[in-house]
Amino acid sequence: MDADRLLAGLGQRVRALRTERRSTLRDLAGRAGLSERFLVQVEAGRANISVRKHASLAGALGTTPAELLRGPGGERDLPVIALLGLRGAGKTTVGRRLARRLRVPFVELDRRIEEAAGLTLDEIFALHGEEYYRRLERETLDRVLREARPLVLATGGGIVTSADTFGVLRRRALTIWLRAEPEDHWNRVVQQGDRRPMADHPEAMAQLRRLLAARRPLYAEAAYTVETSGTETDEVVRRIESLVGRYSPPRARFMTT
């Protein structure tokens, strides 16, 4: 491995671990005894870091110097892994666990959209409408993809309805539909403490079935489909890892597991 690749891998690993631990540049720099400016250079792969600083940074991240040099996912070149599905498909639960196993950041696209807008999703839709949200969704996705690093991305349930945005995602990421039965979507949302689906909506389940049926052909355009109903989270993660291992960009094969 040449020096430039080594430093790039180190930067990716530092950024992935910092993101996973929800630490700011300032927090990590303080714990490692480094300047924020130097840490920015490290994450960008431009810092000629000394052995002493390398060891301090590893300690601040709760890992070893050797692990930092492995880079995200070791020596493999991992893609952006985009998880698709309606609410309750398991995108967040599966995504977080998959990201930990692959040692890459986990990103929720809707959270990035909220950060960009300075509003919650409910406020975005109430104040500006869906068209504005879809524009933010595309702009935010472009920014995430421009980071040019491996990560696990949980997308919004309706991203497949925007042909251009979904097309960009399919071309530049490994798309995986987490397929589930309507009852599982419903139960998982309720188990998360959100009882809004049933509040004052006697036809909510019927609406959910219709929505899932309407979007099923769009979700099926993902590179792969992984069944989550009746399947433990760890098994779903293992199946996705297997798919990632044999994924060959830019054209992926469709396979149901």
Image (spheres, rainbow, N blue to C red):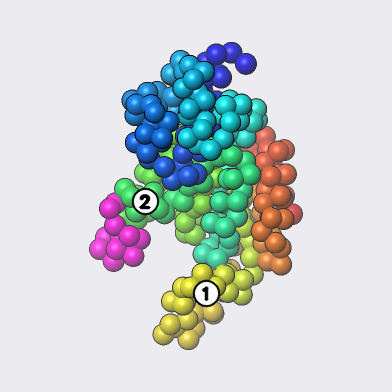
Foreground mark, 2 or 1, reads 1
Q: Which residue is mark 2?
A: 113
Between 61 and 163, which is closer to the camera in this rendering? 61
Q: Which mark is residue 190?
A: 1
Regarding residue 13, the answer to whether it shows in the image is yes
Q: Which mark is residue 52?
A: none
Between 136 and 5, which is closer to the camera in this rendering? 5
Q: Position of residue 250 (x, y in %)?
A: 61, 34
| Three-letter amino acid code of the residue under disc 1 | Val
Q: Is residue 130 magenta?
A: yes
Up-down relation of residue 224 to residue 76 (above or below): below
Q: Main secondary structure of the magenta part?
A: helix
* Image position of 7 (left or right of 179): left
Residue at left offset 72%, top offset 44%: 242
Q: Is residue 205 magenta?
A: no
Residue at left offset 52%, top offset 18%: 51
Picture quarter with the N terminus:
top right
Up-down relation of residue 72 to residue 126 (above or below): above
Reading the chain from its start, which is encountered first: label 2 or label 1? 2
Up-down relation of residue 173 to residue 111 (above or below): above
Q: Position of residue 54 (x, y in %)?
A: 50, 23
Q: Residues within 10 Å of mark 1 (few under 14, many from 20)?
A: some
Q: Position of residue 237 (x, y in %)?
A: 67, 51
* Label 1 residue SS: helix
Residue at left offset 68%, top offset 48%: 240
| Three-letter amino acid code of the residue under disc 2 | Ile
Give the extent of the magenta segment. Answer: 117-131
Q: Position of residue 178 (x, y in %)?
A: 62, 57
Give how far apart the Cα atoms at labels 2 and 1 are: 24 Å
Between 58 and 189, which is closer to the camera in this rendering? 58
Q: Residue furthest top?
A: 2
